[in-house]
Image (cartoon, rainbow, N blue to C red):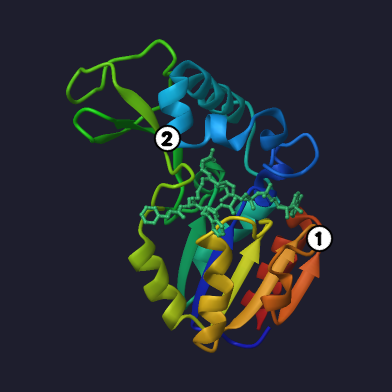
């Protein structure tokens, strides 16, 4: 890999697959078990809050039983040793990047371990079930929802992401199917500003034709090898 000064990395569910976290679209993935409209939209939450709170309680519980894999820890090494600017944007709501040692993670779709109160609209760190309608730590109202971005909701920190995409000289996408926007459009944004683009994934994503370079295989193998190469360049 040539020398780069400003890197933006986008990760998706594929980077957590080897940790044992279900992806969305692989066979038997999360969306196979539930209709997106029922569990990942505001309308679904309004229609059946128990189903949605239970869906996220189950995912939060599953997360407490798994750990980061070598792909997560390799990105933490990159964060520590890379001398340029690095922005790690994740679509994932798990905390495996942080548990793998990353300290600066931009969760554009929110986090399982955060609660959003629909009364006072304050976000609080959260690691317990919500199905029993616990009190908001700030206003005490029993109106917490998962602090995740559902379909039809605006992802977080988009301005910051687009600024980084306009300034990066390398954009790397890891473990995402490129099926969900606006994240799936980031490669075109970066490319449009002259960045080199690299896809690391198990198989070609829906946006693979936008990438100038691609390596296919498991993130747990591809990412440590790529980080080694980049830091030795
Ligand atoms: C918005 C959080 C507007 C919750 C998620 C028509 C055209 C274009 C866009 C749209 C459209 N109709 C509707 C839209 C917009 C919509 C969208 O894109 N829909 C899609 C379905 C077409 N997007 C939205 O609604 C977004 N918001 O547009 O707002 C707006 C404007 C103004 C004002 C207000 C609003 C919000 C989208 C966010 C939804 N939330 N997650 C939760 O987690 O429950 S989406 C969820 O799926 C993930 O967060 C992720 O972002 C997304 C995609 O999942 P991936 O991470 O890619 O996972 P997937 O399973 O798909 O793929 C895994 C990949 O890994 C695979 O390629 C696999 O091969 C690979 N892999 C597997 N194992 C490994 C591996 N790779 C390496 N190693 C391995 N071991």
In this rendering, the answer to whether 78 lies above or below 144 is: below
Residue 13 in the image: state x and y as whole percent: 64, 47
Q: CA distance from mark 2 to mark 1?
A: 31 Å
In the image, taking residue 76 as reference, residue 69 lies left or right, namely right
First-in-chain label (2 vs 1): 2
So how many labels did they put on this image?
Answer: 2
Residue 197 in the image: state x and y as whole percent: 63, 78
The quadrant where residue 148 appears: top left
- Foreground of the two, 85 or 15: 15
| Residue 78 in view, yes or no | no
The quadrant where residue 157 appears: bottom left
In this rendering, the answer to whether 138 lies above or below 95 is: above
| SS class, disc 2 | helix
Q: Nearer the viewer, mark 2 or mark 1?
A: 2
Residue 62 in the image: state x and y as whole percent: 61, 26
Residue 48 in the image: state x and y as whole percent: 47, 20
In this rendering, the answer to whether 24 lies above or below 213 is: above
Q: Residue at x 21, y 27 (%)?
A: 119
- Foreground of the two, 157 or 101: 157
> Is the shortest distance between ligand 1 and the CB of mark 1 under 8 Å?
yes
Q: Residue at x 67, y 34 (%)?
A: 30
Q: Which mark is residue 203?
A: 1
In the image, taking residue 65 as reference, residue 160 lies left or right, namely left
Q: Quadrant of the N terminus?
A: bottom right
> Is the shortest distance between ligand 1 and the CB of mark 2 under 8 Å?
no
In this rendering, the answer to whether 182 lies above or below 72 is: below
Q: Which mark is residue 42?
A: 2
| Residue 211 in view, yes or no | yes
């Amino acid at each position: 890999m040539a020398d780069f000064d400003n890197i933006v990395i986008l990760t998706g569910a594929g980077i957590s697959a080897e940790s044992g976290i279900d992806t969305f679209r692989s066979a038997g993935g999360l969306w196979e078990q539930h209709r997106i409209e029922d569990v990942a939209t505001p309308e679904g939450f309004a229609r059946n809050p128990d189903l949605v709170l239970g869906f996220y309680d189950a995912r939060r519980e599953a997360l407490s039983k798994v750990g980061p894999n070598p792909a997560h820890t390799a990105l933490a090494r990159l964060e520590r040793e890379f001398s340029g600017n690095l922005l790690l944007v994740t679509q994932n709501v798990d905390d495996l990047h942080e548990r793998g040692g990353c300290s600066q993670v931009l969760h554009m779709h929110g986090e399982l371990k955060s609660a959003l109160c629909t009364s006072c609209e304050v976000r609080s760190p959260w690691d317990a079930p919500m199905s029993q309608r616990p009190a908001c730590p700030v206003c005490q109202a029993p109106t917490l929802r998962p602090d995740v971005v559902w379909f039809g909701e605006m992802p977080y920190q988009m301005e910051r992401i687009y600024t980084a995409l306009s300034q990066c000289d390398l954009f790397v996408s890891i473990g995402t199917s490129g099926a969900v926007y606006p994240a799936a459009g980031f490669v075109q944004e970066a490319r449009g500003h002259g960045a080199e683009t690299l896809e690391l994934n198990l198989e070609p994503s829906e946006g693979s034709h936008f990438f100038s370079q691609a390596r296919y295989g498991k993130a747990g193998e591809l990412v440590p090898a790529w980080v080694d190469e980049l830091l030795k360049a």
